[in-house]
Amino acid sequence: MTAIEIPTPHGPAVAHLRRAATDPVGALVLGHGAGGGVAAPDLVAVTEVAVSLGFVVVLVEQPYRVAGRRSPAPAQHLDTAWTAVIEHLLDGELSGLGIVAGGRSSGARVACRTAERTGAAGVLCLAFPLRPPARKGRAPAPGRLPELKAVRVPVLIVQGQSDLFGMPPDAPGREVARVRGNHSLRSDRRALVDAVTVWLPRVLPGR
């Protein structure tokens, strides 16, 4: 895997690039969760699947993580940095390739919000945080369903059946794979792999 430092308006990001063996059919660009990194087990599993299907995979570390901060940056900063990284990659390492964007949790939200700007052919959401868990003494926070509804390309959501962030609904163009486990998606790797294996080639079927 090759690490590439990419400048963004909010500091450098790092793109970890894993190439397919020959003549890639497309690229899958994935972001990490708010408090985690690109070594999350579900991101690793999806990377292996996508490479086996002929995709180049890029795992993007947001600038706040590169700078050593644990608290996530504001949504606007995340979106701007993500867009800058994909634009850079499409001008270079991913030139000529169609892309599927995605990520786990917070990274999935970023991919949804920027899908149109980045020209993504589809969005892969791992553990989409539909609604924040309730906090004692506070009013419920707004749900994130509008972020999913705004996406105009095919979406796959892989969601743990006991995820405290809730279960997103199916909709035309939006498929939800319900798997055993919680927000970590650690309990049923086989179901995760199977869902992505079926869906990804439908979005970018190759040459």
Image (cartoon, rainbow, N blue to C red):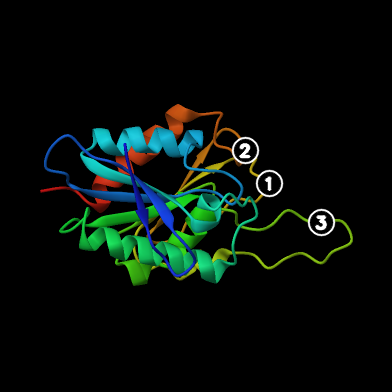
Q: CA distance from mark 1 to mark 2?
A: 7 Å
Residue at 47 percent of width and 42 percent of height: 38
- Looking at the rendered structure, the secondary structure element under dot 1 is loop
The disc labelled 2 sits on which kind of residue?
Asn
The disc labelled 1 sits on which kind of residue?
Leu
Q: CA distance from mark 3 to mark 2?
A: 19 Å
Q: Which residue is mark 3?
A: 135
- Looking at the rendered structure, the secondary structure element under dot 2 is loop
- Expressed as whole percent of the image width and height from the top left, the position of residue 139 reads 81, 67
Which circle's residue, 3 or 2, is located before the other in the chain?
A: 3
Which circle's residue, 3 or 1, is located before the other in the chain?
A: 3
**Quadrant of the rendered structure where residue 145 is?**
bottom right
Number of the front mark, 3 or 1 = 3
The disc labelled 3 sits on which kind of residue?
Arg
In the figure, 90 relative to 54: above or below?
Answer: below
Q: Which residue is mark 1?
A: 164
Please give the label number shown on residue 182. Answer: 2
The answer to whether residue 146 of the structure is visible from this angle is: no
